[in-house]
Image (cartoon, helix red, strand yellow):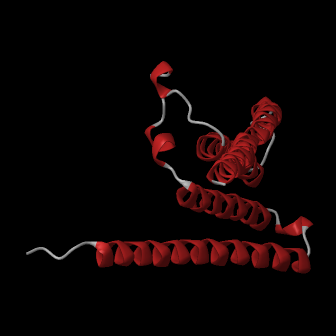
């Protein structure tokens, strides 16, 4: 009887290990997403180069406002590219596999330290910054936009700011809760 029970337990654990292996290996399904984001970064670079060429090709024929709009467009594209890099590196490191930093001398220090919480906050910060730049571009060119469109842009920006604050607040509360739970488990010093 024990032999039959032992074999059933072995099969159960074998099935369990197989399921866990499939689930654990499924993280590699995310790799093509990150490669796709790298390709999107190439497209973003091409758009940046196009805007840069347009910006520098006629500097004396544009107004001050158009110059500021051109610079803001370049900054906006740069922030968007930075956001993509943050998502690619942090997402890959957090969800797929660790990158061997020993092979890269100029590895940014923040990339090895950012966790999922940090990734969320960096993403929200970048989105708020991109939204603020878009809003500033709109304010620089008020003649070509309606009051209703301005209200939508301002409303969306406020939603992004509030969302970022809520993310930061919930993470802070979560960290405080984890710290208190850890402190409760620590034996008192005698």
Residue 179 placement, left or right of 33: left
In the picture as drawn, the residue positioned furthest to the front comes out as 1
Residue at far left of view: 190
* Quarter assignment of residue 116: bottom right
Residue 173 picture location, percent across and down: 47, 79
The vertical placement of 43 against 6, above or below, is above
Q: Is residue 168 visible in this depiction of the protein?
A: yes
x and y percentages locating residue 141 in the rendered image? 81, 63
- Percent x, y of residue 7: 69, 46
Report x, y in % for residue 45.
76, 33
Q: Residue at x 70, y 44 (%)?
A: 14
Determine whether 166 is above or below 86 in the image. Answer: below
Q: Residue at x 68, y 45 (%)?
A: 17
Which residue appears farthest toward the top when viewing the image? 103
Image height of 12 relative to 188, above or below:
above
Q: Is residue 10 left or right of residue 144?
A: left
> Residue, x 65% and y 46% (percent of image)?
95
Q: Quadrant of the N terminus?
A: bottom right
| In-image side of 170 versus 21 (left or right) | left
Quarter of the picture containing the C terminus is bottom left
Comparing 9 with 3, the one in front is 3
- The number of numbered discs placed on residues in the rendered structure image is 0
Task: Report the front residue among 176 and 169.
Answer: 176
Asked whether residue 74 is in view, the answer is no
Q: Is residue 1 above or below residue 113?
A: below
Which sits in the foreground, 103 or 133?
103
């Amino acid at each position: 009887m024990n032999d039959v029970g032992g074999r059933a337990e072995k099969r159960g654990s074998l099935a369990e290990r197989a399921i866990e292996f499939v689930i654990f290996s499924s993280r590699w399904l995310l790799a093509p997403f990150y490669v796709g984001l790298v390709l999107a970064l190439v497209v973003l670079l091409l758009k940046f180069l196009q805007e840069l060429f347009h910006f520098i090709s006629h500097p004396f024929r544009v107004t001050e406002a158009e110059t500021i709009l051109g610079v803001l467009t370049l900054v906006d594209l740069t922030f968007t590219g930075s956001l993509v890099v943050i998502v690619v590196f942090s997402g890959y490191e957090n969800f797929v596999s660790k990158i061997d930093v020993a092979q890269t001398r100029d590895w940014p220090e923040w990339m090895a330290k950012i966790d999922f919480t940090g990734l969320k906050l960096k993403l929200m910060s970048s989105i708020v910054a991109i939204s603020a730049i878009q809003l500033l571009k709109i304010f620089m060119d008020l003649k070509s936009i309606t009051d209703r469109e301005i209200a939508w842009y301002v409303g969306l920006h406020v939603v992004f700011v509030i969302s970022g604050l809520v993310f930061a607040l919930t993470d802070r509360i979560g960290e405080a809760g984890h710290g208190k739970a850890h402190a409760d488990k620590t034996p008192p010093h005698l």
